[in-house]
Image: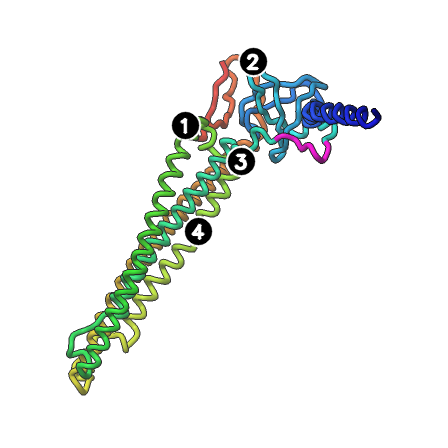
Amino acid sequence: MTLKHGLIGAGIVILGVSFAAPALGHGLASAQQVRALGNGAAVRLDPSDSSPVIANLAAGATLDWIGESGTYHIVSIPGQPGEDDLIGYVLSTEVEVVGNVSAGAQPRATGSVIPDIYTQYERSKARRSSGLKRSIWGGSLAIVAIATTQIVFAAADDDAYADSASHQAAVDRHSRAGTVRNAFTLAGAGLLTWGTADYFLARRDMGTMEGELPTLAVPALEEQYRDASARRGSGKRKLLWGTIMAGGSYATVRWLPWLGVPDRADFDTEWEYRSAVHRRDRTETANSWFIGVGSVLGVWGAVDWVLGSRKMYEIEAISRVTALPAPQRTNVAGAGPDLFVRRVAGRTEIGLVWSR
């Protein structure tokens, strides 16, 4: 009899724990909440100051706490009867976290798995940048491989060599270089294709998101100023290296006697003269490549330098205007104009408004 009562009691305890666990779990999961510190605490759709406000909290109002996203708390807003709860973001400075959560019941992460539009935009922006870099590296790799084969390993006519064995060795060397060139060219073409695809796909995604939220395309003035400063610095470096590349190549070919135009009277044998002619031809080819690449790099750098400096000047002018004290307004007819600075459709407008 004692054993029977003991088994019955154990079964009741097991059933009670089984049914109570979900209820206890739910209570623990929602035990931690946020409480508004003052009236008007804004709950936004995304963790950003420019995101739409979906609710305002009265002082002391509480919402279930879900997690954190930077300086924002992720909260659950009860939906209408028959509707799902909404996920919102509220600044941590406007609320306080109340309640405790046990170690076995962590807060839910609902809504925090999918990145918000700002995070998606930054990812697409980084993808576009990396795609452009891969395209440049891939194209450069293919060009360098082709240029190196033509300049360094090119085989001349038979007369440029002392004997047929030397000429055959040069031909074999050029053939091996051609095999390596083909491998590098294919690798560069693949890298170029990959980078180009990433660039255009990311650019398309950015355009779509900018259409949905136009403020994405207009970063803060501080960020624009940093980008303009970086562009100006990069332009200076490109201009310097382009000038060194083109000017150094030209000076080397013109001033180094060993690379000058050969004179038949300076050589004892015909093959020595032919070898010098071949060396001069390769030098001219290399000089053309270096001058061309250096010129393109120099022009690119000059454009970046000028445009970056111009953008910095515009932003500095805006900062000076906005730092001026506000003009005193008068209600007298014929009063002076009011100065304004505003952003409209991605453009900065500075002007005067005449009082009526």
Q: Amino acid at mark 1?
A: Gly
Badge 2 element: loop
Residue in the image at 51% along x and 20% along y: 336
Prevalent SS, magenta region: loop
- In front: 134, or 102? 102
Whole-number angstrom distance, CA of label 2 to CA of label 1:
32 Å
Residue 228 visible somewhere in the drawing: yes
Q: Amino acid at mark 4?
A: Ser
Mark 4–mark 2 CB contact (< 8 Å): no
Residue in the image at 53% along x and 38% along y: 222
Mark 2–mark 1 CB contact (< 8 Å): no
- Quick one: label 2 or label 1, which is nearer the N terminus? 2
- Quick one: label 3 or label 1, which is nearer the N terminus? 1
Question: Which tag is nearer the camera, tag 2 or tag 1?
Answer: 2
Q: Amino acid at mark 3?
A: Arg
Mark 1–mark 4 CB contact (< 8 Å): no
Give the labeled residue for mark 1. 211
Where does residue 62 sit, x and y in percent of width and height?
A: 69, 20
Where does residue 308 sit, x and y in percent of width and height?
A: 43, 44
- In front: 115, or 342? 115
Whole-number angstrom distance, CA of label 1 to CA of label 4:
30 Å
Whole-number angstrom distance, CA of label 3 to CA of label 2:
55 Å
Give the labeled residue for mark 2. 82
Question: Which tag is nearer the camera, tag 3 or tag 4?
Answer: 4
User: Considering only vertical position in the picture, is 185 above or below 116?
Assistant: below
Give the labeled residue for mark 4. 234
| Disc 2 packing (10 Å; few <14; some 14–19; many ≥20) | few
Give the labeled residue for mark 3. 320
